[in-house]
Image (cartoon, grey):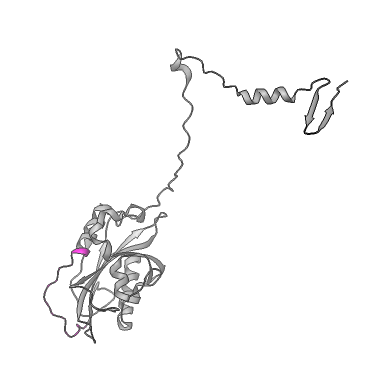
Amino acid sequence: MTTDTPLLPIRSAFSNVITLGRNEGADDAPLNFPACRDLQAYWEALRGTRQMPARSEFDPRGIEQTLACTFVAEKVAPSVARIRVAGSVMNDALGMDVRGMPITAFFDPASRDALGEATRDLFASPAMVILELSARRSFGRKPIRARLLLLPMSDGEGNISRLVGCLDIAGGLGKAPRRFEVTSLRRSELSGTAPQARPAHNPFPPREAEPSTAGYAFAEAPMTFRSSRRADTSAQEQPQENSLISRGGLRLVVSND
């Protein structure tokens, strides 16, 4: 389960929500972000009564409709996560392949501190983070609004070192590249069983013991396989008295007396 805190005007040591100034051109109409909703529902189903699912449990086939907006990132510092796998929306937003880049690359410099703080909370608490985003109007670019959902995942050792996210843009991206500003941030602490180390998967299971012959009293005795090639070789290796060996135009007489 998650625990939300009420919206507060400023960030403090005891608040989980931060509200920033809204950009010009962004209306207040409620928006629907189906990709974020579907990813969160799949993540909740995976984790059950735990704080979070493991990265190894995450199957892309469970969110086929939202893969274009989804990405997986790895913790490289307390407040920094680097993208490992990303959908096409992430690449289109910056106009390049974003693998290996930090999540902060999608944000204006003024909003990167807020994202860094949210990332730190996600790994440390742990917590689920939802950021409402906007991008200003510029030459050839319309103002847009988007939502960024960040959900923690554990690795094989039980450490919270992965996150799965979704960048859902309302009404399309428009002309790229685009960078976003954070207009509001909601942090929800996660309750449940803490992640545990998972046993390493062995693709080659141990060989089962040979079955006992007690239950096969009426079975025929297995026949011994004898290779005819081996028999011929053995015969050739035995010494022969006064044998004549021919090699092309040469003749060698062997005598074992």
Task: Indicate the position of residue 67 as horizontal and vertical percent values.
Answer: 27, 61
Q: Is residue 190 above or below residue 22?
A: above
Q: Quadrant of residue 110?
A: bottom left
Task: Indicate the position of residue 148 as horizontal and vertical percent values.
Answer: 25, 70
Magenta segment boundaries in residue numbering: 21-36
Q: Is residue 210 above or below residue 23?
A: above
Q: Residue furthest right?
A: 257
In the rendered view of the protein, which quadrant contains the N terminus? bottom left
Q: Is residue 152 left or right of residue 186?
A: right
Q: Quadrant of residue 43?
A: bottom left
Q: Main secondary structure of the magenta part?
A: loop
Q: Is residue 84 left or right of residue 150?
A: right
Asked if residue 252 shows in the view, the reply is yes
Q: Residue furthest front?
A: 249
Looking at the picture, tell me which residue is in the foreground, 43 or 65.
65
Looking at the picture, tell me which residue is in the foreground, 24 or 159.
24
Q: Residue at x 15, y 68 (%)?
A: 32
Q: Residue at x 40, y 50 (%)?
A: 198
Q: Residue furthest top?
A: 218
Magenta-drawn stretch contains 31 = yes
Looking at the picture, tell me which residue is in the foreground, 255 or 124.
255
In the rendered view of the protein, which quadrant contains the C terminus? top right
Magenta-drawn stretch contains 117 = no
Q: Residue at x 30, y 72 (%)?
A: 92
Task: Indicate the position of residue 76 as horizontal and vertical percent values.
Answer: 42, 68
